[in-house]
Image (cartoon, rainbow, N blue to C red):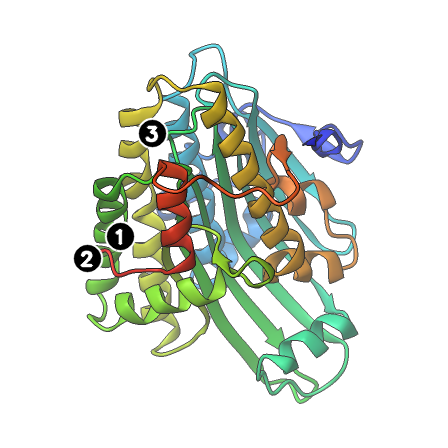
Amino acid sequence: MIVRFAGLGLGAATLTTVAAASGNTNADVLPPSLDVSSFMAEPVTPRSTLIKDKDDMKVKMEMLIMKIQADFCRALENEEDPSKKFIVDRWTRAEGGGGVTCVIQNGKTFEKAGVNVSVVHGILPVDAVRQMKARGKELIGKELPFFAAGISSVIHPSNPHVPTVHFNYRYFEVTQENGEKMWWFGGGTDLTPYYLVEEDVRHFHSTLKKACDLHDAGYYPKFKKWCDEYFLVSHRNESRGVGGIFFDDFEMHSQEDSFKFVKSCAESVIPSYVPLVKQHRNDPFTSAERDWQLLRRGRYVEFNLVYDRGTKFGLYTPGARIESILMSLPVYAKWEYMHSPSDGTPEAKLTEILRNPKEWI
C-alpha cells in the first residue's frame, strides 16, 4: 500500500506569497544588527518592535531562526535543479504571531523539503499546560501567556542513498499567574539514512560534536544519548534513524549562554548534512531500493504522528497552522504487512543498527 499525503499543499487564503524580504516597503529602517535583507521573507514581528526590543531574547531568537532558514534554503537550492526554487509563504495566526514556511516538492534532488519558522504568542491552552506539567514544569496557573519561536525542518530526498535530515531549534517563554517568567530552549538535529554509509554518519556526528564542544565537552554524549532515547519508535522497537543530538527544557546556564549554544548547533546543520547530499544525490538506485525508502518513510510517519512533542504541541495550540505542523510528512510513504529484510542485505544491516544504537565517534 502506498499512501500519498496529498492534503499537505500550500495556498490557504491567509497566506501571502513573497519572493524576498528585501521587497518589503515597511518604513521602519532596521539597524545593521537587525539586517533582514537576506531573509526568505519579512520577519513575523513588526520592525518597530524589533528595533525597540532588539536586546530581548524573543527578538534575538527570531532573527537567528530567520537567518538559519535563509542560509539552509539557499544551500539546498544549490543542490536542486536551477528551475526549482522554494515556495515561500508568510502566514499569520489570528491568536498572535505567524511564521514563514518554505517548501520544495517534487524536485530532482528533493522530493519534499520543508523549512518552517514560527513565532507565535497568546494564551497557553489547558491541555498544553497539562502536557508541560507532566514533563516536570512547575507552572502556576491554568491559562498562561506564552511566546514560542522556532525553526523546524525535514528534508526528504528523492534518491534513497541520500539520508533524510531533521532539525528543530526553539525558544519558549511563559508568564505565570504571579508574573514570574519561565524560559527554556530545546532542539536537536538527527539523521535518518535509508542505506547505511558509516563514514557519512561519523561525519554527521563529528560535526555536531564540534558544535557542542565549543560550549561544554559533556553536551554531545549527553544529548546524543537523549536523541537515541527520544527518537525511539517504541511499538517497532527501533530508532527512527542513526541519531544526532536532542535536548529540551535547556536552561543550564544564563539565558545568553544557552542562546549561544543553540546558535552553534543551528549553524552546524549545513556542514553536517549538505556534503552528504552533494556526495549521493546522483547515485544510481533500483526500484527495490526505492521501495525500501518508502517503507522506512512509513516508520518516519509513525513516529511523527504518534510520539513527536512538537506535533502534539502544535495540535493542542488554538489557531495553529496544520499545514506547517504536518510539513514533516513525506509526499509518499509505504506500508507492507509483516515486511522484514532478508538476512545479509544492506537493508538488514540498517535495521540491526536501528534496533541497537551505537556510538559513532
Dot 3 crowding, Cα within 10 Å, few <14, some 14–19, many 20+: some
Nearer to us in this view, 157 or 131: 157
- Name above or below for residue 107 compared with residue 154: above
**Residue 103 in picture, x, y percent from top left:** 57, 30
Q: Position of residue 340 (x, y in %)?
A: 52, 43
Q: Secondary structure at mark 1?
A: helix
Q: Position of residue 204 (x, y in %)?
A: 27, 46
**163 or 252: which is nearer to us?**
163
The quarter of the picture where the N terminus appears is top right
Read off the residue under disc 1: 205
**Above-or-below relation of 247 to 133:** above
Q: In this rendering, does residue 238 appear at all?
A: yes
Drawn side of residue 108 relative to residue 320, left or right: left
How far apart, in angstroms, are the residues tagged by discs 2 and 1?
Answer: 7 Å
Residue type at mark 2 is Ile
Identify the residue position indicated by label 3 in the image.
277
Q: Amino acid at mark 1?
A: His
| Residue drawn at x 65%, y 69% as measured from the top left | 146
Dot 2: element? loop
Q: Is residue 283 above or below residue 54?
A: above
